[in-house]
Amino acid sequence: MNSVAEPPKGPMPRRSGIRMAVTSVIVVLLVAFVVGNSETVRMSFIFFHAHVRLIWALLCTAILGALADRLAPQIGARRRSKARKP
């Protein structure tokens, strides 16, 4: 006996169709965003300057912001737990 369930055959379930439509819209918006922000900008760092495409600067700052958003509560909780210990 085969314990692996086979995917349903026939027309795609409604939820999968909606998911595919939403994913398609997100991909189209992402491509438009990349094309619209493809010019080169000068970024100043502490010790040097760099010329990068604006999209990379935006993506890097978004990733760093997301990481900070996820790590800040964990660091705060760790500090609070250390402060409570005698």
Image: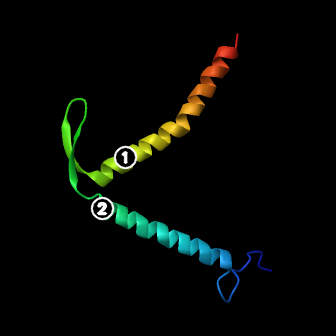
Mark 2 or mark 1: name the one nearer the start of the chain. Answer: 2
Does 35 appear above or below 70? below
Disc 2 residue type (three-letter) = Gly
74 horizontally vs 49: left or right: right
Residue at numbered disc 1: 60
Does 26 appear above or below 5? above
Give the residue displayed 26% in from the left and 59% down from the top: 38
Q: How is the image coloured?
A: rainbow
Q: How many numbered tags mark residues here?
A: 2
Point out which mark residue 81 bears.
none
Estimate the x, y position of residue 29 in percent, counting from the top left. 42, 66
Estimate the x, y position of residue 35 in percent, counting from the top left. 30, 64
Quote the CA–CA distance across marks 2 and 1.
17 Å
Closer-to-camera residue (64/85): 64
Quadrant assignment, res 80: top right
Disc 1 residue type (three-letter) = Cys
Estimate the x, y position of residue 72 in percent, counting from the top left. 54, 32
Of all residues shown, which one is farthest toward the top? 86
Give the residue displayed 48% in from the left and 66% down from the top: 26
Closer-to-camera residue (29/4): 29
Of all residues shown, which one is farthest toward the right? 1
* Viewer-nearest of discs 2 and 1: 2
Marks 2 and 1 in Cβ contact (< 8 Å)? no
Describe the element under mark 2 as helix, strand or loop.
helix
Give the residue displayed 60% in from the left and 21% down from the top: 79
57 horizontally vs 27: left or right: left
31 horizontally vs 24: left or right: left
Residue at numbered disc 2: 36
69 horizontally vs 15: left or right: left
Quadrant location, the N terminus? bottom right
Disc 2 packing (10 Å; few <14; some 14–19; many ≥20): few
Give the residue displayed 23% in from the left and 49% down from the top: 52
